Every structure is written in structure tokens, then in C-alpha cells.
Amino acid sequence: MKHGKWHKRQVDQSLPAWKVEFLRYKELKPIVSAVSGRPPSPAEFVALLDAEIEKINAFFIEQEEFFIIRHKELQVAIRDALARKAAVPESAHEAEIAAIRREIVNFHGEMVLLLNYSSVNYIGLAKILKKYDKRTGAVLRLAVIETVLAQPFFTAEAVTLMVRECEAMMEAVFPTAPGEGQAAARRDREALAAAEQRIFRNTVAALLAMEDVRSGSSTRGRHSLPPLTLPDSEWLRSF
């Protein structure tokens, strides 16, 4: 599948409100190709990409800050629910825990979507830079990608950590005793696993392939991309 179609599919599978926040790969590609005229100069093209990177970073940071607040709220909700367990009827406690569990599953899914957003935009930037260098003979890719590797949307350290902590939170609210609560918890686990696989399958495969190819190269040149070190390669490989 060509990257343009893959990129569009990833955008379409994201949350509707997020679609305009992705890299405008479809709009940038014809600018680079410039069949009927000259492509933008390196300075002009870098300015276009800088605007896109600024937009991507701003959106990512905004979502990250929202997730940090929501993460703390869920931690408090779990702590309070467990503290009230002995003081409320069992059915009321199970209903409260079930509601929190659904919130955690949704929260986890949204964070996975944000990690996917980061990955899709990184790959799109690498692809459009490759096209520009090939079309013009310029050597922009290495310098721009080196800058991108330090951007908040790429490092994604806080979100990656919250995904792990969210999975630990689930252990506190998924019942271990057999019964109706256990069945509901199992359904939520299955829904979570299915959502993760649907969102991450293509993106993780692409990122890991890029990482393996670059790390295995014995020669480096000015046209080479730097080795790709993912925020948490082993965690991604577990999907």
C-alpha cells in the first residue's frame, strides 16, 4: 500500500476531532512533486514543515496535559472506591468499579490513539522529506529528522508512562473472584485488546521495520536517516 493511502486510513481511523491535526501529507505531496512548476526552495519547504511540526506539537501537548489531569482523577476515583468498599453494599461497589473500569478502558484507548498520532506524523514527515530530497537533490531529511526526534510529539515519554500506569490501574479494578463482575471485566479486557490491535497493527509494524533496517545498517552516509530509537521499543514489540 502506498504511503498516501496508508496515511489517509490512519487519519480516518482516528477520532473525528483529531483529523485536522495530522500532518497534511496529501497537500504537501503535490507541492513537492510540482509537475507544472518548480518545487519550493529548501528554505520555503522547511518553513512549511516547521508550521506543520508546530501544529502537531501544540495538539500533542494539549492532549498530553488533558491526559495527565484525567489520569490523576482516575487514580483518586479508584482509591476512593476501594476505601468505600466495606461501607457500601456489594452491588453498589461492583457498579462503581464497573463504571471506573469502563472509563479506564476508554482512557487507555485514547492514549494509544495519541501514540499512534505521534507515529503516523513521524512517518509522514520522513516520507515527504525523502520525496523532496529525491525531487530536488537537496539534503534536508537528515537535519529535519534529527530535530523531529527531540520534539515532544515524538518522544511521548509522559504518555507512554501513563499507558503503563493505566494498565497497572486496571489490575486494581478487574475482579479476581468468579462471578458476574469477572465476566464484565473479561469483556472489557477483550474490548481493550481488540482496540489496541486495530489501532496499532500497521503503525507498530512500520515503525519496528524502520528501526530494524536502520539499526542493522553497517554504512552511514549523508543521505541516511539516523538510527530510529523508539520511546519504548520492547513495549511496542509486545503488541
Image (cartoon, rainbow, N blue to C red):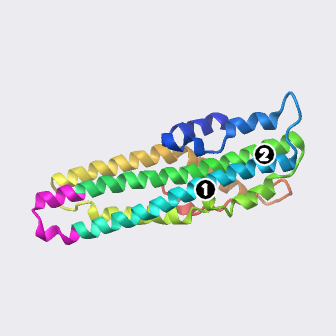
Left-right relation of 152 to 146: left
Left-right relation of 74 to 30: left
Residue 85 sits in quarter: bottom left
Q: Is residue 87 magenta?
A: yes
- Look at the picture and state if 22 lies above or below 236: above
Kind of residue sitting beneath label 2: Lys
Disc 1 is placed on an element classified as helix
Mark 2 and mark 1: span between their CA atoms? 24 Å
Residues 195 and 98: in front is: 98
Q: Main secondary structure of the magenta part?
A: helix
Q: Is residue 39 visible?
A: yes
Residue displayed at 39% across by 67% down: 72
Q: Earlier in the sequence, mark 2 or mark 1?
A: 1
- Look at the picture and state if 92 lies above or below 124: below
How packed mark 1 is, by other alpha carbons closer than 10 Å (few <14, some 14-19, many 20 or more), is some
- Look at the picture and state if 90 lies above or below 106: below
Left-right relation of 237 to 48: left
How packed mark 2 is, by other alpha carbons closer than 10 Å (few <14, some 14-19, many 20 or more), is some
How far from the left and from the top, in percent, is residue 121? 63, 48
The residue singled out by tag 1 in the image is: 58
Left-right relation of 60 to 38: left
Stretch in magenta: 82-97
Quadrant assignment for the N terminus: top right
Number of marks present in the image shown: 2
The residue singled out by tag 2 in the image is: 130
How far from the left and from the top, in percent, is residue 115? 54, 54
Residues 210 and 53: in front is: 53
Q: Is residue 94 magenta?
A: yes
Disc 2 is placed on an element classified as helix
Kind of residue sitting beneath label 1: Ala
Residue displayed at 84% across by 29% down: 35
